[in-house]
Amino acid sequence: MTDIPNSTAARMQAARFRADKLAALRAYFAAQNVLEVEAPLLSRGASHDAHIGVFPVPDPTRPEGAMRYLQTSPEPHLKRLLAQGFPDIYSICKAFRLEENGARHNSEFTMIEWYRLGFKLRRMLEETVEVCALVSGPREMVSLLYVETFVAVTGLHPRKATREQFLEHPVFTARGFAAEDLSILFPEKTDVLNFLMSEVVEPSFDPAKFTVVHHFPIDLAAQAEPDQEEPFLAQRFEVYAGGMELANGYKELIDTREYRTRFTAENAKRLATGKLEIPLHEEFFKDLGSGLPACAGVAVGFDRLVMLGLGTTDIRETLLFPWDAA
């Protein structure tokens, strides 16, 4: 059913598929003794990631000008619960990101996020693939190291090559970028790495398989622990299938002071690129001051998994009310 007609019957089929898969996910986590929890949709804190657009909402319950933010992920609140002593937890919730809507993006989407105490990165990525398969159906898994894969596809080493060398990659000419605009569009090396990953490396993956890329550069892993043997790398993984990213997971950073340092740095990047500065949420740091236990966590885009399960290439065909119809 690659092209689902916009009919009541097709929408009902998608709705039933979603309902069945949500029930399967809850049954899976219940069998694993992972507790379902809820995080607020509106919060005084939000993601500081410089690449994530945030929806600000005026808060009439607080002094004039005070804001809350639609959550981009339940991550901060789930980590607060873990620091308070909660066991393994998960949330299936709505998340919001201010970005262009289209075949793979809807500004309001459904996220599955969970945290496992004591899990190593390998165990977490294997469980993530298992959970993805519950929705999309089973696929062969391929596991790749970020650096080796990046070098093999682009011919450039993420650490050794300079930003200027990255910008000489032929993809920039092929995409029609003017040389004088590159410094504006890609002001930092991380910006170029992200672009090359999405535009050059990811398209090389077999869309019929689950491709897991792990051990990203530490500069591309906002809330991950550094690798103990190679501090240049972080304990982060991503899962891809169907030509798109499905999941993003970490062996979670537990140093509260390092969280503050990283969030402050991301806010500086947000300001430099004209994005909204997000105030540091002191309740987050207060709770994490009790100590975040060693854990691994992952966020998975449920709607994209439904796309794979239904065999469609348009996220709007998985939703009863996509963004333009909401």
Image (tube, grey):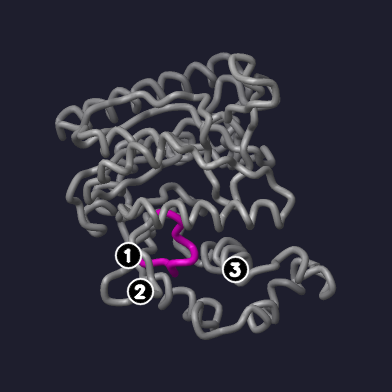
Where does residue 132 sit, x and y in percent of width and height?
34, 42
Whether label 2 touches label 1, CB < 8 Å: no
Magenta segment main secondary structure: loop
Q: Is residue 312 above or below residue 177?
A: above
Q: CA distance from mark 2 to mark 3?
A: 22 Å
Three-letter amino acid code at disc 2? Pro
Q: Amino acid at mark 1?
A: Ser
Label 1 or label 3, whichever comes before in sequence order: 1
Q: Earlier in the sequence, mark 2 or mark 3?
A: 3
State how far apart marks 2 and 1 are (Cα): 21 Å
Classify mark 2: residues with Cα within 10 Å, few (<14), some (14-19) or many (20+): few
SS of the residue under disc 3: helix
In which image quadrant can residue 55 be found?
top right
Residue 273 visible from this viewpoint:
yes
Q: Is residue 209 shown to the viewer in this render?
A: no
- The answer to whether 207 is drawn above or below residue 165 in the figure is above
Which amino acid does the dot numbered 3 rest on?
A: Leu
Which of the pair 86/185 is nearer the observer?
Answer: 86
Q: Is the residue 179 above or below the residue 53 in the image?
A: below
Q: Which of 169 and 56 lies nearest the eye of the viewer?
A: 56
Q: Quadrant of residue 234?
A: bottom left
Residue span colored magenta: 215-223
Residue linked to disc 1: 143
Q: Which corner quadrant holds the C terminus?
A: top right
Q: Which residue is mark 2?
A: 231
